Image (cartoon, rainbow, N blue to C red):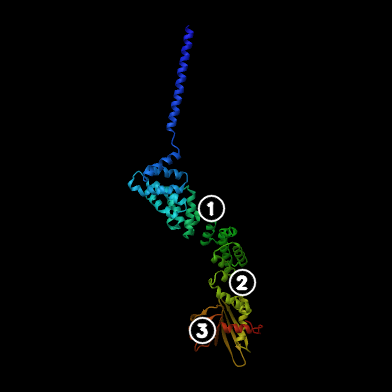
Amino acid sequence: MDNLYTIVLVAFVLIVFTTFLLLTTQVKKKSKRRLRPKSNQVLIRDAIRKLDSDPHNPESLKILADIYFKESKWEKALPLFQTQLDIAAAYPQIDQFEAGLKLGICSLKLGKPEDAVKPLLLARHERPENFEINYNLGEALIQTNDFEKAIPVLRKALAINTEANEVYASLAKAFYKTKRFKEALPYLKKTLDINPESKEFLYYMADSLHETGNTDKALKIFMHLRADPLFGIYSCLTAGTIHFNQGHTDKAIRDFEIGLKHQSNDKDIQAEFRYKLSQAYLKQNDIGKSLMYLKETNAIKPNYKDVPSLIARYEELNQNQNYRTYLIGGNSDFVSLCRKLVLVYFKKSRAKITNINVFTDFAELTTDIETDKWEDTVFFRFYRTTSSVGELFIRDFHAKIRDEKAGRGICVTAGTFSDESKKFIEGRPIDLIEKDMLVKMLTSIESEPNYLQL
């Protein structure tokens, strides 16, 4: 009987305990259901409902704006943050810093940097030591091309967080765009250490090196970039210019020809390539190709630089070998031609060249001239310029005649002499020979005459 009682008691206890556990579990489940946070859909629905009745409800504005912001729905978030800023004066619970920062970020994400600047400036006024606000404001200023103002803001951001690699690229661009090339270099180096494949910053690096006198290093990068679809055309232009200035005309022509293969709607750069090719071929005395590129330049952009006058000049050069030699021939050929001009000027004479001096733009020959009727020392100066020769040059020429103890001076130019120059020689033993007469003299030269050389 006792055993039966014990069994019944144990069974009763088990039933009670089991029932208790079941009830407890159900209570916990209900409790969890009550504590589970509302889904975003519910929050959005509740916020919209409240805003329908009160468009300035600060709590609903914040909830809805933050949800859209986290979900990267910038177009929906932007007006909500704007409303928060607009009513902030009447609602102290609105965080103006957060609203301004997020409004600025939304504007940046939507490609409206000009709209981002004002709210970001407002937020920076609230917390000037905040990294995120300084960085985003700097980005907004860069995207609005206000590079000078962006620099101190981005420097502040970097000072707050020296590990923020993205700031180096922004600072590098800001310094480069403000032509502060020396200051740009360390930021460019850091940027390329982080992202060595960036063609944009590689080009900035090359250009900054070039501008700071590191021409050889710059040239290597420009040549590396020649095939790049975006920066190649500019790299070809600069590389060609460097090679041309270094006297490597063949390499310059190669650079410019590669540049012409790039497609570009920029008429200025297309004209510039052809203009520079014209100069390079002229350096090689290839007047035909030089003229061809000049005419192409004129067709693309009429009256570009001095192209019309160069076309007229080189067409004349192309038709007269002696005139071409006079203007652009090597020094030895030029001096040889000047010797011929001496005897063309004094026909049926014997000439002895006693002194020759060759300078960049002119040559001087001191000659003893003997004819059947007279003999004297005559001092010649041959200018290679096609521009006007002024009075100061003729005064210098007159002084040189006295120094050489010459009885007469002949000054020749491929251009003209100024009115002041012509007035100065009145009453003085000086003849001035301008282009038209020079061309006639050059045309009359057929073979080199006999003369005595120094």
> Mark 3 against mark 2, which lies toward the viewer?
2
Secondary structure under the numbered disc 2 in the rendered image? helix
Please indicate, yes or no, whether residue 139 appears anywhere in the rendered image: yes
Q: Which residue is mark 3?
A: 398
Q: From the top left corner, tell me how far across and down residue 204 is, in percent.
A: 52, 58
Q: Viewer-proximal residue, 84 or 278?
A: 84
Q: From the top left corner, tell me how far across and down residue 402 is, in percent.
A: 52, 85
Q: Viewer-proximal residue, 203 or 85?
A: 85
Q: CA distance from mark 2 to mark 1?
A: 41 Å
**Image quadrant where residue 279 sits:** bottom right
What's the residue type where badge 3 is placed?
His
Q: Which residue is mark 2?
A: 292
User: Is 50 located above or below residue 195 in the figure?
Assistant: above
> Mark 2 against mark 1, which lies toward the viewer?
2
Q: Viewer-proximal residue, 141 or 76?
A: 76
Q: Is residue 338 left or right of residue 72?
A: right
User: Is 119 located above or below residue 407 in the figure?
Assistant: above
Q: The C terminus is located in which quarter?
A: bottom right
Residue in the image at 35% along x and 47% along y: 88
For this orientation, the residue located farthest to the left is 90
Q: CA distance from mark 3 to mark 2?
A: 42 Å
What's the residue type where badge 2 is placed?
Met
Q: Which residue is mark 1?
A: 192
